[in-house]
Structures are given as C-alpha cells and as structure tokens.
C-alpha cells in the first residue's frame, strides 16, 4: 500500500517516475496535489538566483531580458504525492498541445468529459490543468494568458449551449513566442498587376514593379518550460542583385525595402540582368506553345511586331489573344485568335473565325475574319466582315461592310455594303451585290437616336407635369393678388400719415413679392425647358433625314444584277432600284410628303 509523501521538486514528472519505480507501482497509479510553488530567475547582471515576488516577471525585469539567452528561469514545487483516485464529480478528459517552440500551450478538452456546473468546478478544472502542466514540464502562474478567465469563459459556454459537441481548445499558457527572422527577398509586383500568363507584363507610369525587401533580425523567445528559444540569423541572398535602368525605372527606399516604380508605360523586360520598361517587342510567332497570349492592354504604350520566319506557321496562332497598343504582323492570323489594339497592320491574311477590335486604324492585306475599327484599309476583303467609321477596300469578294463611308476600287460578287453617308465604287465586275444606305445599321447612330428619344420622352413628361403645376400656381396667385391690394394700400396710407405700418401687413406684402418672383423664375425655367426640348426635337429630325443626305456613287456601268437600297430611318420604308445603265450617283430626295430615288449620270 502506497503511503503519501510530501516532496520538493523541480521536475514533477521525473520525481513521479523515480518514486513509482522505488515503490514498485505504475506511474499512472500515482497522482499529486500542488501545495505551494516558488519562481526564481537570474538576470543578465545577477550573480545569484532572485526570488520572484508574485507571478509578474515584468514587474522585476524586462521583456528584452526575458528573451535573452543569458536569462535563467526555474520553479520549485511543494507537492503531496498520493495514490490516484478519480474526482467524485469532475471527469475532465483533455490533452495538452503546444506549438513547436513550447511558447504557447492549450488544453484540448474532449466532448466526452463530464463537467458538472457545481460550486467549486472552476477550482477543480484549474487543479487538473495545473497537474497536467507540471507532468508535461511546463511552468505555472507566470503567463500572460489568464487561466481563471479562460476557465470561466469555457464554463459560460457550457452553461449557455449545453454539453460540448466538439473538442474545445482552452488557452492555458503563453510566455514570449519567438519572432522569426525575415530573409531578404525580391518581389516581382509587375506579375501581380496582370495575373496572367502573358508573355509581357504591361505597366503604367508610377506602378510598383519590383521590390527588394531587407532582411530583418528576429527575436529570441522564452518557452513555457522556462527554456530559452534561440532564433537564427536571417539569410541574405539578394542584396545588390536588382539592377534597373534609371531612364525608365525609379527607386524609393525606406527602412523596410527598396521599391522600384515605372517612369513610363510599357512592359517590364530584363536585358543582360537589367530591369527596364520597354515599349517595343519583336517576336517570331505568337502561339500557345511558344508564347501564350500577350495581353498588356491598349492603354499602355506597347508595340508588338511579329515577324514570321516559318512559312507553314501562323504569325498569331489559333486561339491566341493579343492586347497591345500597336500591332504589326507580317504573316497570318489564325482561327479564333482575338486581337485588341489601337493600331493594327497585318501583312498576310486573317482567318474567318478571327476577331479584331481596333480603336483607330487597321491595315490588312487579305481579310476573311471579323474586324471592328475606326478606319479600315484593306487590300482584299474576301467573305469577311468589317464595321468601321471609314472603310477603304481595293478588292471586295463577298463579305459585309457596315460603315459611315465606304470606298471600294473593284467590287466583285455577293457582297453587302451598308453605309450611313456614302458608298463610292470605282468598278463593279460581279453581281448579287447589295448597296444599302441604312443609318440604323451603324451602332453609334442607332444609340444616338435611341438616347434622344428617351431624353425627349422624359423631358416631355416632366414639362407636362411642370406646366400643370404652373397653371395651378398662377390661379392661386391671381386669387391672392386681389386680396393683397388692400394690404399694399394700408402700407401706402401709413407712410403718408407717418404712422407705424402693421407688421402683419408688411409680412404679407413681402411674402407676396417673394412668391411673385418665385413664380416668374419657375415660368422662365419652363420656357428654357421648352426651348431645350424643341432643340432636341430638331436634332432628332435632322438625324431622321440622314437618308436624304446619303449617296451611292459608281464610276462604271451597272449590269442590272446589283441592287441599291435606301432605308428611311424613321419609317423603315425601303426604296430600292436595280440599275442597268450608266448611273453615277443614286440619292433619295423628298417630293412633298413622299420620297423617291434620284438616279444621275
């Protein structure tokens, strides 16, 4: 039979193992009660161990000293070792987990625990936790985490929500966790700006493109078992490795890092180890295999030249996206390729499933795909589609054009040309062509018409409401006018007699004058609104007369197999003719309330 003993210990678990071995019992059959404990420390200038009054280390030393490797910390415990016996009420099943440094510890409480909400339960839980802390070699009582508060928070949770449904992590100890060092590093911010697999990374002026982050020393720590935690020195690998072109990149430095900013728009390039902002890139081909898509953005001053060297390859491969300010392609554009640019030059041909969007001028040798541009200059248009402000084509075979003005040298067969203002053709050598004047086909015209109509409807409705309001206010004003004369007369008489006028009369007259001025302003505002509405209607009517200002010009002889159509933008009525003679111009004219086509040689 084990006889309980009292013992002074500096390592509770070691002493329990020794006593269990000496008495011939298993260590799990022993338990202990903590009677008292004392904490001692030896600072950097102390020759002897110092007794800690209370539990607050920071009242007698500093955090810097506690973190120092010269600082020493130990505890002595007075314990009563006895046979293990379960608690009559509390069955707290838990384990203790720490971080790898043992600078933080938590008790992980099993939901199978039995925790009675009885008087004294907080004390019982704390005693159980402290015993296990000591078994794990952890110190007690000197930590920033307040164990009593954490236990209260845990009990409040059970009180409100009932028994645990999942393991509960209860913080029990934290001393001074180490602060790891920061190794120096280089951050390529320009890659984060785009977050794409593009060959070039487009940047704007003042964009942060690169950063060298200085190495930082960490801070040693102190573990919950009292041991010092040594933090290694930071690793310095990249100091002096970033070299930039000062003409295109500027640097700013502070205590944390050196940051490099673009001085101009373009793309980040590294030549012979030097980072710079370039504005022209020349490559052989653009394909998923070799380059991937190239999407820098049309707002950055980047020119891309693709000079095809392999005859059997497309200059821009199937499915590749190109987004730059200027693009010069010597070869062909493959199927499902998408191009976005301000200016484009294509020296060969475009695939019929390619899509090209150009904000300014596009110059293409042979076009079979889909093109939108401000100005399109095409040598051969073959079954492709073009939408632009101005289109100039040397030879057109099939396909479709929608533009404000169109100029074609030679038109062959089966084409559809739609314009807002004019279509001019030197020679027609085929048939089945449709030359159409249809203002609504142009997106800009259609949107302007629709916006005007919506604006006119809204302003008309508002003007009608305000006109009703004006009439009502004018009627009310006239009714008041007859009554206000007597107050005005009394003021005049008071002035003649040299007597003090009635304040009520003065106020009524002043209010009447103010209402009169307000009514006049309101009336003037309505007149301005009516004038503005009239101007809008005039603008709309002018837009509706776009067909009367359009013309189709042909400098050759029609063969009777090409159709000319004018579409009224207001009524959508078609006026069509199929000339079979020498006709230089075809236009639409008004005759009274009607319109008719006029053919002039």
Image (tube, grey):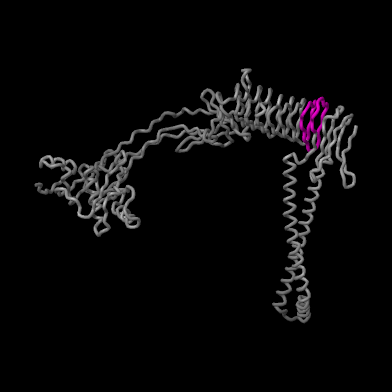
Quadrant of residue 550 in the image? top right
Does residue 546 show up? Answer: no
317 in relation to 139, above or below: above
- Residue 179 shown left or right of residue 358 in the figure: left
Along the line of sight, which residue is nearer the eye, 577 or 262?
A: 577
- Residue 301 shown left or right of residue 50 in the figure: right
The percent position of residue 228, horizontal first and vertical second, equals 28, 39
372 in relation to 109, above or below: above
Magenta span contains residue 418:
yes
Does residue 131 show up? Answer: yes
Magenta span contains residue 108:
no
- The residue sitting at 59% across, 36% down in the picture is 205
- Residue 3 shown left or right of residue 233 in the figure: left
Quadrant of residue 19 in the image? top left
- The residue sitting at 75% across, 31% down in the picture is 391
The percent position of residue 242, horizontal first and vertical second, equals 49, 29
92 in relation to 183, above or below: below
- The residue sitting at 35% across, 33% down in the picture is 233
How many marks the image carries: the answer is: 0
The percent position of residue 36, horizontal first and vertical second, equals 18, 51
Along the line of sight, which residue is nearer the eye, 106 or 413?
A: 413
- Give the residues drawn in magenta, as a range: 405-434
Along the line of sight, which residue is nearer the eye, 358 or 522?
A: 358
């Amino acid at each position: 039979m084990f006889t309980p003993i009292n013992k002074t210990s500096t390592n509770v678990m070691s002493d329990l193992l020794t006593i269990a071995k000496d008495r011939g019992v298993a260590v799990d059959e022993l338990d202990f009660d903590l009677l008292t404990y004392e904490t001692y420390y030896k600072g950097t200038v102390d020759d002897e161990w110092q007794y800690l009054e209370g539990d607050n280390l920071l009242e007698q030393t500093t955090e810097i000293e506690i973190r120092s490797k010269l600082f020493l910390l130990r505890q002595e415990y007075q314990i009563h070792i006895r046979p293990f016996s379960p608690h009559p009420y509390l069955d707290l099943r838990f384990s203790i987990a720490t971080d790898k440094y043992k600078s933080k510890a938590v008790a992980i409480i099993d939901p199978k625990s039995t925790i009675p909400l009885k008087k004294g339960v907080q004390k019982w839980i704390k005693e159980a936790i402290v015993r296990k802390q000591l078994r794990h070699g952890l110190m007690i009582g000197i930590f920033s985490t307040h164990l009593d508060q954490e236990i209260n928070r845990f009990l409040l949770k059970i009180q409100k929500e009932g028994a645990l449904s999942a393991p509960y992590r209860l913080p029990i100890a934290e001393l001074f966790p180490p602060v790891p060092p920061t190794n120096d590093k280089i951050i390529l911010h320009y890659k984060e700006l785009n977050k794409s697999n593009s060959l070039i990374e487009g940047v704007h002026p003042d964009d942060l493109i690169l950063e060298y982050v200085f190495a930082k020393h960490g801070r040693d720590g102190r573990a919950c078992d009292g041991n010092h935690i040594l933090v290694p020195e930071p690793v310095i690998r990249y100091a002096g490795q970033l070299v930039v072109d000062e003409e295109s990149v500027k640097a700013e430095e502070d205590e944390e890092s050196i940051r490099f900013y673009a001085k101009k728009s373009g793309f980040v390039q590294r030549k012979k180890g030097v980072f710079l902002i370039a504005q022209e890139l020349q490559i052989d081909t653009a394909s998923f295999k070799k380059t991937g898509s190239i999407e820098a953005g049309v707002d950055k001053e980047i020119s891309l030249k693709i000079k095809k060297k392999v005859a059997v390859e497309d200059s821009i491969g199937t499915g590749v996206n190109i987004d730059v300010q200027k693009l010069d392609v010597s070869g062909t554009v493959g199927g499902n390729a998408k191009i976005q640019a301000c200016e484009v030059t294509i020296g060969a041909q475009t695939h019929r499933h390619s899509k090209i969007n150009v904000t300014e001028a596009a110059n293409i040798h042979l076009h079979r795909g889909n093109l939108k541009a401000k100005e399109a200059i095409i040598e051969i248009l073959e079954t492709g589609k073009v939408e632009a402000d101005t289109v100039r084509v040397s030879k057109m075979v099939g396909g479709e054009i929608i533009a404000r003005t169109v100029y074609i040298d030679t038109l062959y067969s089966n084409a559809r040309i739609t314009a807002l203002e004019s279509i001019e053709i030197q020679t027609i050598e085929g048939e089945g062509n449709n030359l159409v004047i249809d203002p609504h086909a142009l997106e800009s015209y259609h949107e302007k018409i629709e916006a005007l109509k919506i604006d006119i409807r809204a302003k008309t409705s508002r003007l009608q409401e305000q006109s009703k309001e004006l009439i009502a206010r004018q009627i009310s004003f006239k009714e008041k006018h007859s009554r206000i004369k007597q107050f005005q007369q009394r003021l005049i008489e008071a002035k003649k007699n040299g007597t003090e006028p009635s304040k009520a009369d003065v106020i009524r007259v002043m209010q009447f004058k103010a209402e009169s001025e307000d009514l006049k302003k309101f009336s003037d505002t309505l007149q301005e609104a009516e004038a503005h509405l009239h101007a809008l209607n005039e603008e709309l009517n002018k837009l509706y007369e776009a067909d009367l200002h359009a013309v189709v010009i042909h400098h050759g002889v029609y063969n009777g197999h090409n159709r000319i159509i004018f579409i009224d933008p207001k009524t959508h009525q078609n006026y069509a003719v199929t000339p079979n003679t020498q006709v230089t111009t075809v236009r639409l004219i008004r005759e009274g309330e009607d319109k008719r086509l006029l053919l002039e040689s």
